Amino acid sequence: MMQPVLSLNDGSQIPQLGFGTWQIPEAATAVSAALVAGYRLIDTASVYGNETGVGEGILLSGVPREKIFVTTKLWNSHQGYGETLRAFNESLRRLRLDYVDLYLIHWPMPKWDRYLESWRALIELRKDGRARSIGVSNFQIPHLRRLMDETGVAPAVNQIELHPYFQQRPLRVFHAQHDIVTESWSPLGQGALLHNVKVLGIAQKHHKTAAQVVLRWHLDNDLVAIPKSVNPDRIRKNFEIFDFQLDAEDIALFNDLDNPKGRIGPDPDTADF
């Protein structure tokens, strides 16, 4: 099944729908199932503790490596130039890969003030080809401005909490102005949206599940979404969203769900891990 891709500011392309592996400790089976179902973007992180399983799942799937877009992330305790390079090498070893398609700084952790040096290390990793694209996760506008002002290099991606209950419009406008792709983690609001009456009405109208129409909302807004599941049926159904689009009425209903206080996860300015 063909799926849409978005162009990154470095010339690469990223699939718009991926498979997230947060809280999937034994990831091999789920990753293999996702790849067999048609997903081509797999998202993991060193802190998830499942990079080894992700690598195993890639091998189990039989899908050629060059057809898979693999993302992993630098954890907070490994920030800093030298530490970043060492942590990246360990991630590659666990994944059993020669390169990743996208490497992200997981959180800015501004009180530690090491993300700029980590970013310089990521720039080097991109130059040597072991990280095809580089980006960040959970960065706010001031953090992004500092990276670009100090290095002249804009992230290709900023992966942030984003779902209809928390739509992050100002940050998305900034991304668009600087050619940064927005990637949504917790795209289903950790399941909270699946029982919303408006969402269920949109789903009934399109003969789809609530999860399918929420994921379609992400795609129709030029976002990358990375839902996760360990249920093979849900993994497959979450991927079956390329045969319909939302209309203006649907989009308006989704827009009304936005809440500035709708954040579920930590605030990047105050997060302390």
Image (spheres, rainbow, N blue to C red):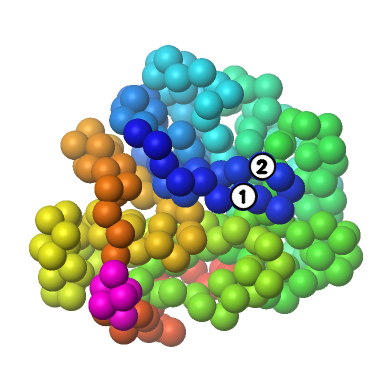
User: What amino acid type is highlighted by mark number 1?
Assistant: Ser
Viewer-nearest residue: 59 or 177: 177
Q: Which mark is residue 230?
A: none
Q: Which residues are magenta?
A: 247-252
Where does label 2 land, which residue? 12
Residue visible at 68% across and 28% down in the picture: 99
Residue 135 x/y as whole percent: 67, 52
Work out whether 41 lies above or below 140.
above
Spatial distance from mark 1 to mark 2, Cα to Cα? 6 Å
Residue visible at 55% across and 35% down in the picture: 69
Residue 203 x/y as whole percent: 16, 62
Quarter that holds the C terminus: bottom right
Residue 6 x/y as whole percent: 55, 50
Mark 1 lies on a secondary structure that is strand
User: What amino acid type is highlighted by mark number 2?
Assistant: Ser
Work out whether 116 lies above or below 39.
below
Where does label 1 land, which residue? 7
* Residue 60 drawn in magenta: no
Residue visible at 82% across and 57% down in the picture: 153
Mark 2 lies on a secondary structure that is loop
Work out whether 189 lies above or below 242.
below
Q: In the displayed structure, does residue 41 sit left or right of residue 115? A: left
Mark 2 surroundings: few (<14), some (14-19) or many (≥20) residues within 10 A = some
Work out whether 207 lies above or below 168.
above
Is residue 91 visible from the viewing direction of this image?
Answer: yes
Mark 1 surroundings: few (<14), some (14-19) or many (≥20) residues within 10 A = some
Is residue 30 visible from the viewing direction of this image?
Answer: no
User: Badges 1 and 2: C-beta atoms under 8 Å apart?
Assistant: yes
Viewer-nearest residue: 255 or 98: 255
Q: In the displayed structure, does residue 36 sit left or right of residue 179? A: left
Residue visible at 40% across and 62% down in the picture: 220
First-in-chain label (1 vs 2): 1
